[in-house]
Amino acid sequence: MYSELQTTSNFTFLRGASHPEELVQRAAELGYEAIAITDRNTLAGIVRAHAAAKKHGIRFIPACRVDVQDGPSLLAYPTNIHAYARLSHLLTVGNLRTEKGKCELFRADVYAHA
């Protein structure tokens, strides 16, 4: 069975075109076992994707692409509620550091929240 682990929704402005629900529905139609939504520096589509996954009987993997100013982008797949909380806090740090709609993170921030 195939699982898509790097999908961008319209919650990544100017990069993704489809709503999380549409991505999950299409993955289910194609017979995927699971799908992860990896929007850039946001978890905003997670709830919608999770609800759609339950509706369509497909496993949903919460995730995020973390853009780091002084390093490569990282794909983060929190494996439990504590890891999800650390990822959420990391994104909050990056959002508070710069203007609305942007996120500024550095490797030191990632290390501090790992």
Image: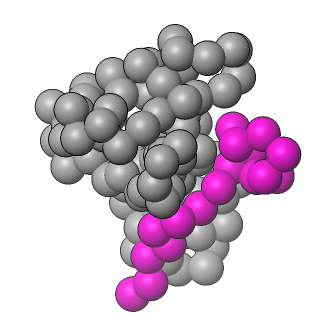
Magenta stretch: includes residue 6: yes
Q: Using the rendered image of the protein, determine whether residue 49 is visible from the camera's viewpoint.
A: no
Q: Could you say where residue 95 lies in the image, as x and y percent from the top left? A: 54, 20
- Residue at image location 70% in from the left, 22% down from the top: 101
Q: Residue furthest front?
A: 70
Please tell me whether residue 84 is drawn above or below residue 66 in the rendered image.
above
Name the residue located 58 percent from the left edge and 47 percent from the top edge. Answer: 39
For the point 59% across and 61% down, which residue is it? 7
- Kindly indicate the quadrant of the structure image that contains residue 113: top left
Question: Does 44 appear in magenta?
Answer: no
On screen, residue 27 versus residue 57, left or right, reads right
Colour scheme of the rendered structure: one colour
Please state the extent of the stretch shown in magenta in the rendering.
1-18
Most extreme residue toward the bottom is 1
Give 31 or 71, whichever is nearer the viewer. 71
Q: Position of residue 28 (x, y in %)?
A: 56, 68
Q: Main secondary structure of the magenta part?
A: loop
Which is nearer the eye, 105 or 101? 105
User: Measured from the top left, where is residue 16 in percent x and y?
Assistant: 76, 52
Image quarter in which the N terminus is found: bottom left
